[in-house]
Image (cartoon, rainbow, N blue to C red):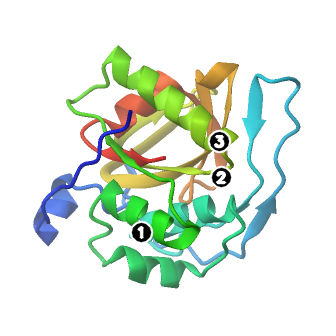
């Protein structure tokens, strides 16, 4: 059901302007201090409607390590705990960031034994069918104890009304869902609040013109 895609290599200038590489908030990016890993126990679902994976949260140590940090969080849902530096080397991350969701998919498969695919969301906004596909992919992945890594760009608003703005691109990890997948829980390696819920349509449009690994 997922489509595999491969984007051509972008120049450093292109990545900084339009690529999915660097976590740059609406305000000027600051280098975040390295934080110790935080083990997060999955919330007990009240029924079959809510599921959040056990995982180990890590904050990105700088403005361009969002993909290594998000991938590391996803790996921890399967008990894999490499360093962010090791993940960054495998991803090919540079100060310009990480190329695309193809790279996170490749590394997740390499380090977990497989099961991940890349799905691209074409166009400036997500179509209803693409929202449905994202919802189904998240539910399937979380039920299979796999965190999802999403390559996002622009601004999205969570269910509490907080804005998360990354005009230069950002990577986050989806580690849970509720309401049959109509809302997903995000572990954000940049955000000081660490975790928040967001509706599936807003997440899909946040990913638009990029992709996700599930």
Above-or-below relation of 143 to 102: above
Label 1 crowd (10 A; few <14 / some 14-19 / many >=20) = many
Please report contact status of discs 2 and 3: CB closer than 8 Å, yes or no.
no
Disc nearer the start of the sequence (2/3): 3
Horizontally, is 143 left or right of 200 in the view? Answer: right
Mark drawn on residue 63: 1
Q: What's the CA distance linking mark 2 and mark 1?
A: 16 Å
The reply to whether residue 152 is in sight is no
Mark drawn on residue 25: none
Q: Which residue is nearer to you in this view: 83 or 61?
A: 83
Q: What's the CA distance linking mark 2 and mark 3?
A: 19 Å
Above-or-below relation of 166 to 95: above
| Count of marks, rendered view | 3
Label 2 crowd (10 A; few <14 / some 14-19 / many >=20) = few
What SS does tag 3 mark?
A: helix
Residue corresponding to mark 3: 142
Q: Position of residue 185 (x, y in %)?
A: 64, 38
Please report contact status of discs 2 and 1: CB closer than 8 Å, yes or no.
no
Q: Residue at x 63, y 56 (%)?
A: 192
Horizontally, is 39 left or right of 214 in the view? Answer: right
Q: Residue at x 31, y 78 (%)?
A: 94
3 or 1: mark nearer the eye:
3
The reply to whether residue 212 is in sight is yes
What SS does tag 2 mark?
A: loop
Quadrant in which residue 168 is drawn: bottom left
Disc nearer the start of the sequence (3/1): 1
Q: Which residue is nearer to you in this view: 56 or 105?
A: 105
Q: Position of residue 56 (x, y in %)?
A: 72, 63
Quadrant in which residue 199 is drawn: top right
Q: Position of residue 197 (x, y in %)?
A: 63, 33
What SS does tag 1 mark?
A: loop
Residue corresponding to mark 2: 194
């Amino acid at each position: 059901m997922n489509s595999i895609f491969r984007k051509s290599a972008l120049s450093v200038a292109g990545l900084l302007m339009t690529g999915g590489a660097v976590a740059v908030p609406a305000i000027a990016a600051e280098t975040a201090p390295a934080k110790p890993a935080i083990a997060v126990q999955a919330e007990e679902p009240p029924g079959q409607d809510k599921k959040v994976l056990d995982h180990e949260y890590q904050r990105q140590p700088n403005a361009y390590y969002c993909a290594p940090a998000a991938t590391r969080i996803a790996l921890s849902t399967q008990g894999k705990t490499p360093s962010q530096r090791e993940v960054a080397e495998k991803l090919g991350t540079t100060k310009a960031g990480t190329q695309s969701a193809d790279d996170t998919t490749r590394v997740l498969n390499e380090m977990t034994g497989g099961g991940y695919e890349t799905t691209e969301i074409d166009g400036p906004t997500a179509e209803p069918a693409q929202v449905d596909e994202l919802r189904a992919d998240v539910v399937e992945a979380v039920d299979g104890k796999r965190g999802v890594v999403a390559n996002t760009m622009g601004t999205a608003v969570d269910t509490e009304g907080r804005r998360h703005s990354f005009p230069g691109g950002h990577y986050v990890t989806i580690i849970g869902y509720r309401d049959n997948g109509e809302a997903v829980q995000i572990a954000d390696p940049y955000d000081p609040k660490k975790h928040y819920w967001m509706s599936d349509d807003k997440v899909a449009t946040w990913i638009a013109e990029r992709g996700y690994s599930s």
